Image (cartoon, grey):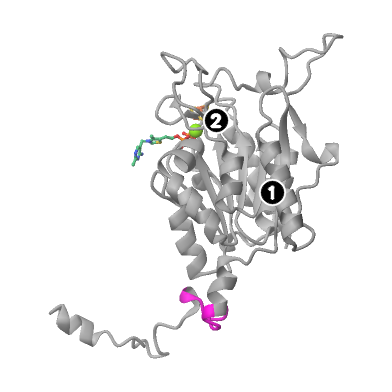
Amino acid sequence: MALKLTDLKTNVHNDWCPGCGDFGILNAVQMALAEMNVEPSNVVIVSGIGCSGKMPHYIKTYGVHTLHGRLLPFASGIKIANPNLEVVCVGGDGDGMGIGAGHFVNSGRRNLDMAYIVHDNGVYGLTKGQASPTLKLGMKTKSLPKPNINQAVNPLLLAIASGYTFVARGYAYDVRHLKELIKKAINHKGFAFLDVLQPCPTYNDILTKEYWAGEDNLDPSGKPVPRVYKLEETGYDGVVHENTEEEIERKVAQAVLKSFEFGDRTPIGVFYQNEFTPTYEERLNSRMPTYRTYPPAMQRIARDDGTPLAKVQKLLDELSLT
Ligand SMILES: Cc1ncc(C[n+]2csc(CCOP(=O)(O)OP(=O)(O)O)c2C)c(N)n1
Ligand code: SF4
Ligand SMILES: [Mg+2]
């Protein structure tokens, strides 16, 4: 039976601020899952801590609200234990590129077949608007007493350098476009990173919906020129079509250059995609050919009569538990 959007909604009270970009991301995730007609019991949404971290509560699939910056190791464990699950990681920019930066880098190197959506709002929303690692040097949001003293991390550049095999950016208020990107990220073979420009109207009064719509960025006739533009409308193609060093280097270099565009012309879409890199699951399978058929979650732990297959008596004796 076809999955409906309403099947993915929960009746949990939503406590995001009115107008928050998180709503657009939530809708896009639900629309993407409904259109892909994935079995909700086969999906796990794994989040960190932050306003963004509340996502699993609002989507009727399995979900885990983990610790600040620790969603990626948690999600990796789930995916390795049961590679048949669709694992979607969701977190904030602080969560992923601040406290969780080490996990961000090393998860890219592993290339598990999962998707990671980052709510990029330039602030620590949940803790009242401190500067997040993606806020540019010198920006002063209304939540900061003084302009930001630190340089910003470029999330797309960091993702490319870390080995993510799908690197894209979406915009929270272009829900249809974002939904398509989420579908691409979930369908991608390998670890997909999707950075989403997410206005936080409560604490970030610079990177607002009005800013991205270009309300103060007028053309000579006085018409607003939106600051986000779609890569695919410019003929840009980030996909690696041939598994050659030359093609991969060319596509990486192109994505690196594009990742620096931010501000008056900010690209959204797929910057880079390479499905030739083996996934972590494929690497595991080549070491343990039984992994695909019997990953840890599929292994029998008991006989039909309920007695355990594992011989734990020796361990219990050593621990003096019997
Ligand atoms: C180990 C730890 N350190 C600090 C915190 C406090 N804390 C909670 S959320 C958060 C920042 C959230 O910002 P971000 O990840 O950008 O998510 P947003 O709220 O903007 O969606 C911090 C510092 C925490 N919960 N745990
Ligand atoms: S503080 Fe910002 S990010 Fe958090 S719910 Fe409110 S508007 Fe959204
Ligand atoms: Mg944030």
Real-space Cα distance between discs 1 and 2? Answer: 26 Å
Instruction: Pinpoint residue 220: horizontal percent, then vertical percent.
Output: 85, 9
Using residue 236 as the reference point, say whether residue 213 is left or right of it. left
| Residue 63 shows in the view | no
Judging from the image, what secondary structure is the residue with disc 1 in?
A: helix
Instruction: Pinpoint residue 111: horizontal percent, then vertical percent.
Output: 57, 60
Please name whichever residue, 160 or 314, is drawn nearer the observer in this view of the structure.
160
Say which residue label 2 marks.
121
The label on residue 131 is: none
Q: Is residue 49 above or below residue 45?
A: above
Q: Could you tell me the amino acid type at mark 2? A: Asn
Judging from the image, what secondary structure is the residue with disc 2 in?
A: loop
Instruction: Pinpoint residue 239: horizontal percent, then vertical percent.
Output: 76, 52
Does any atom of ligand 3 lie closer than 8 Å to the CB of label 2? yes
Please name whichever residue, 261 or 311, is drawn nearer the observer in this view of the structure.
261
- Circles 1 and 2, Cβ within 8 Å, touching? The answer is no
| Residue 114 shows in the view | yes
